[in-house]
Amino acid sequence: MKVAIASDHGGIKIREEIKQLMDELQIPYEDFGCECSTSVDYPDYALPVAEKVAQGEFDRGILICGTGIGMSIAANKVKGVRCALVHDVYSAKLTRQHNDSNVLAMGERVVGPGLAREIAQAWLTNEFEGGRHANRIGKIADYEGK
Ligand code: RB5
């Protein structure tokens, strides 16, 4: 599994925390910024990561901004992306098992680094259950025209 990760200026600390986690878990990743000390626009980071996941260049994406909301809205505009905005460990696990989410969004102004790490670990290590859930995801893909 290869992961693309990015944040805006509001998510830099958690981005670093999650990169450290992926180092520990020996999960390969690429960091797509931001290298920012000033305010940047979250779509400039969400859309490239989402496109890389949709095109199969990366298996998963992780996006962090202040709330996670802007990142998740932008990422979900890309066909084939199922971005889950998650701020608890239970949802992190279930969105992998039931939704096969391929992008995770979190808000650094919502969760601290410790919880963000647990959320990311649950999301990175749980697998899709398929079955009836695959049928449901198929209906979303049909709607997208894929
Ligand atoms: C930036 O101030 C903030 O709006 C952004 O990080 C994010 O929370 C948007 O959804």
Image: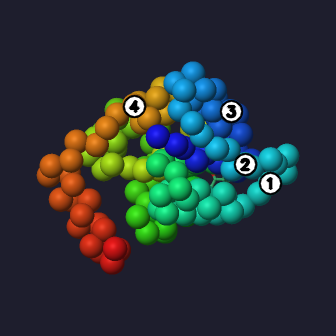
Residue 134: numbered disc: none
Disc 4: CA contacts within 10 A as few (<14), some (14-19) or many (>=20): few
Q: Is residue 132 left or right of residue 22?
A: left
Please identify the residue farthest to the right as the structure is shown: 37
Q: Secondary structure at mark 1?
A: loop
Residue 45, image quadrant:
bottom right
Residue 82, compared with residue 114, is above or below; it is below
Residue 33: numbered disc: 2
Q: In this figure, which residue is indicated by the disc labeled 3?
A: 16
Q: Amino acid at mark 2?
A: Gly
Q: Secondary structure at mark 4?
A: helix
Q: Amino acid at mark 4?
A: Thr
In this rendering, the label closer to the viewer, 4 or 1: 4
Q: Which residue lies at the image location 47% right of the left edge and 58% below the top edge?
A: 56
Q: Nearer the N terminus, badge 2 or badge 1? A: 2
Q: Nearer the N terminus, badge 1 or badge 3? A: 3
**Residue 112: % across, % down:** 59, 29
Disc 3: CA contacts within 10 A as few (<14), some (14-19) or many (>=20): some
Q: Amino acid at mark 1?
A: Ser
In this rendering, the label closer to the viewer, 1 or 3: 3
Tally of numbered discs:
4
Q: Nearer the N terminus, badge 3 or badge 2? A: 3
Residue 98, compared with residue 25, is above or below; it is below
Disc 2: CA contacts within 10 A as few (<14), some (14-19) or many (>=20): some
Looking at the image, do the residues carrying marks 4 and 3 touch, with CB atoms under 8 Å apart?
no
Residue 39: numbered disc: 1
Q: Secondary structure at mark 2?
A: loop
Q: Amino acid at mark 3?
A: Glu
The CA distance from mark 4 to mark 1 is 32 Å
The CA distance from mark 3 to mark 2 is 11 Å
